[in-house]
Every structure is written in structure tokens, then in C-alpha cells.
Amino acid sequence: MQDKVPSGLDRKETEVYRRLDRGRLPKHIAIIMDGNGRWAKRRHLPRVAGHRAGVAAVRSTVETAARIGIPALTLYAFSEENWKKRPASEVGFLMGLLSRYLKAEVPTLNKNNIRLEYIGRQHELPAEVQQRMDWARDATARNSGMVLTLALNYSSRSELVDAFRAIVNAAAQNGGLDHLQIDEDTVGRHLYTRHLPDPDLVVRTSGEMRLSNFLLWQLAYAEIYVTPTLWPDFRGVHLLEGIAEYQKRERRYGGLNHSDAHPEHSALATKS
Ligand code: FPP
């Protein structure tokens, strides 16, 4: 029996969606949005035109993910390195774009029952951008569907540094460091992503094979899907193609695959 396709998917999305195993959708997808500059360069446009075009890709991807019931989507919108190493004019443009995006998008986020969150060193962003971010988070706080997390001024190494500092400070205020015990759970509870499960799938656009300081702890067992599509050309259908590819992989978490662990069940064993 062909079960129902969620409303709102277009024809191409529906085609790919029908091939998916709905019982094995990733619970958390993280995306490294890359290629805005190259997209603009190919069109002899300034880099910022690529960022502007990237907003349509964000919109399509977020809506499709919410429609098919992905519980969490995290987008790497702006790294700490971007902030420090790009010209002030480009950084200023990105800040303005983010503010406009948040203002314009809140009704759509609410319509799709999406709750907005952020990770990264928010306190270093311009005050008016922080205010807009707080406003958008509050305006979507009661939604119970997908959690959309924007990584802004984010660096995975800084996140780990902040986590270790928080662990030590909390211990110092709670009777000292003598009995401090740190395990994986302790670290996880002090990361910016403590509201999220670890991503099952990380998507990177524009063909680069790097993690670029993104969720290094949390991506330990994630499947990696790299597509040559540049971010401004990315749409919901590309996300679904990434999920289809993810579903072809066998996740072992450091263990064995089924036939190696149970050779008596393998095709060869049953034939002989
Ligand atoms: C990487 O492309 C992209 C960014 C640094 C910014 C991402 C921003 C957006 C997608 C638009 C706004 C997002 C939101 C959430 C409103 P790049 O400039 O590094 O591209 P290149 O590698 O081709 O130069």
C-alpha cells in the first residue's frame, strides 16, 4: 500500500519521497551551506548576491524538512572564522540578511510549527541582531514541530572550550574540583547542542570534503553526504536525495555489519 505523501511537496519531491523508508528518516540533519560565492562568481555578480540567493535555498530546505517530519535541522549559517576573516562589508551584509530573514520568516516558521534555536557565541554579534534573534526565538517558542537551529558565529572548538570552562566553573561553585568526574554525558550536557540529539546525517554543498569546524563532537557517527550543488541552487528535493543516499548506508557505530557478526545468516553459509 502506498501511504500518504505529506501535503506541500512538489512533483519532484514527491517522486523522491516515495522511494524513502519513512520509518528510517534521520532524526537530526545538519547542513554546511557552501558555494554562495562561487554561485555569484559564475554569474559575474558580487559575492553578496550569492548570499541573497541562498535565502531561497534556506526557505525551501526548511519547509521540506518540516513537511516530511524531520525532528531537527541545523544550518551552519555563519562561522566564527567567517566573522573574523571576511571583509567587514560582507559580514555587515550577512548580518542584515539574517535580520531580514528572521523578520520575514517567522510567520512561515509558525505556519509549519517550527521552533527556532541558535548555537554559537551570540553575545559577540551586533546588539540589534541579537535582539532580532531573541524576538524570533520567542515568537516561535511554543511550536512543537521541527527544531530549526541556526549556527551563528559558531566554531566547534570554541563550543568545546566553552563546555569545558562551564564544567569546571560549575564544579568550582559546587564544592570544588576534587570530586569532578567528566564523562561523555557531562560534555554532551554542556555543549550548545544540549537541546538536540546528535545528527544522523550531515550534508555539505558545493563539493568540498571538509567539516570546517562544525559540530566535531556531535558528528562522530554521522553519515556524510557531499553534493556538488552550490547552496543557492539547493532545494528541498536535494535534501530528499541526500536522505535517500543516507538510507542506503549501513550504520555500524564501530561494530560489525550484520553478516560479519552472524556469519551463519550470510548468503554463502546458507548455500553451503
Ligand atoms: C558559504 O558560502 C555561505 C556563507 C558563509 C553564508 C551562508 C548564508 C546564507 C546561506 C544565507 C543566509 C542564511 C540565513 C540563515 C538567513 P561561501 O561564501 O563560503 O561560498 P564560496 O565557498 O563559494 O566562496
Image (cartoon, rainbow, N blue to C red):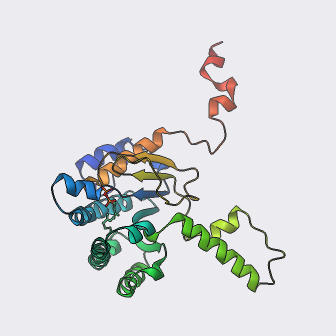
Measured along the vertical axis of the image, is residue 98 above or below residue 250?
below
Residue 114 visible within the image: no
Residue furthest to the right: 178
How many numbered marks have been drawn onto this rendered protein structure? 0
Between residues 241 and 155, which one lies in front from this camera angle?
155
Q: Position of residue 126 (x, y in %)?
A: 38, 83
Question: Does residue 17 appear to the left or right of 51 in the view shown?
Answer: right
Residue furthest to the top: 272
Between residues 88 and 177, which one lies in front from this camera angle?
88
Between residues 262 and 270, which one lies in front from this camera angle?
262
Question: Does residue 100 appear to the left or right of 177 in the view shown?
Answer: left
Quarter of the view holding residue 60? bottom left
Q: Position of residue 204 (x, y in %)?
A: 40, 52
Residue furthest to the left: 44
Q: Position of residue 82 (x, y in %)?
A: 39, 67
Quarter of the view holding residue 117? bottom left
Q: Position of residue 113 (x, y in %)?
A: 38, 71
Measured along the vertical axis of the image, is residue 57 above or below residue 106?
above
Q: From the image, which quarter does the C terminus lie in?
A: top right
Q: From the image, which quarter does the N terminus lie in?
A: top left
Measured along the vertical axis of the image, is residue 133 above or below residue 216?
below
Q: Residue at x 56, y 65 (%)?
A: 157
Q: Quadrant of ligand 1?
A: bottom left
Residue 141 visible within the image: yes
